[in-house]
Image (cartoon, rainbow, N blue to C red):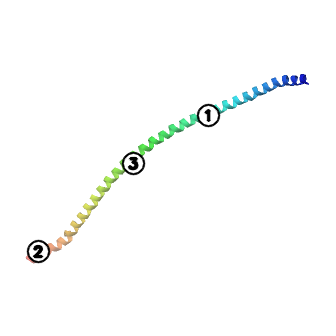
Amino acid sequence: MSLIMKENKSTKGPQTENHLVVILEDMRAKFQVFDEGLISLRKKTDQMNANLESLRDEVGDVRLRMARVEAKLAKLEESTARIESDIRLIKNDLKAKVSFEEFKVLEKRLAAATS
């Protein structure tokens, strides 16, 4: 019986060793695929980071331009307020003055009164 067990052990040894080699090769292949996927993922992440940085720069530029536009708008609002005030004053001055027709009537009255 011990001779039979020795034969079984000797025949199982190379088969087990071959089986382990196959398993290890399969694991190496899977790790290689995993490594390639990881490298690809890193490249994509780097590209996304670069795109994000570019977008941050663009947002900064837009904010700067927006601040400039807001400053210009504030100046325009001030100018508009001044113009509106000036127009109100001119309207009031014009209302206080005599129109051309009224002037002619007054001129006729003056002429009639002096004659």
Q: Is residue 91 positioned above or below 21 on the image?
A: below
Q: Residue at x 10, y 77 (%)?
A: 113
Residue placed most toward the observer, 97 or 78: 78
Instruction: Tell me which amino acid carries mark 2.
Output: Ala
Which of the 4 image quadrants contains residue 6?
top right
Q: Secondary structure at mark 2?
A: helix
Q: Residues within 10 Å of mark 2 (few under 14, many from 20)?
A: few
| Residue 25 x/y as whole percent | 72, 27
Q: Which residue is mark 3?
A: 66
Q: Residues within 10 Å of mark 1 (few under 14, many from 20)?
A: few
Question: Reading the chain from its start, which is encountered first: label 3 or label 2?
Answer: 3
Residue lying furthest front: 2
Locate residue 82 relative to residue 32 in the image: left or right: left
Residue placed most toward the observer, 88 or 114: 88
Residue placed most toward the observer, 20 or 38: 20
Mark 2–mark 1 Cα distance, whole angstroms, equals 106 Å
Q: Which residue is mark 1?
A: 38
Q: Secondary structure at mark 1?
A: helix
Residue lying furthest left: 115
Q: Secondary structure at mark 3?
A: helix
**Marks 2, 1: nearer the viewer:** 1
Q: Residue at x 57, y 36 (%)?
A: 44
Instruction: Tell me which amino acid carries mark 1.
Output: Leu
| Residue 34 x/y as whole percent | 65, 33
Mark 3–mark 1 Cα distance, whole angstroms, equals 41 Å
Instruction: Tell me which amino acid carries mark 3.
Output: Met
**Marks 3, 1: nearer the viewer:** 1
The numbered dot on residue 111 is 2
Residue placed most toward the observer, 43 or 58: 43
**Marks 3, 2: nearer the viewer:** 3
Q: Residue at x 46, y 42 (%)?
A: 56
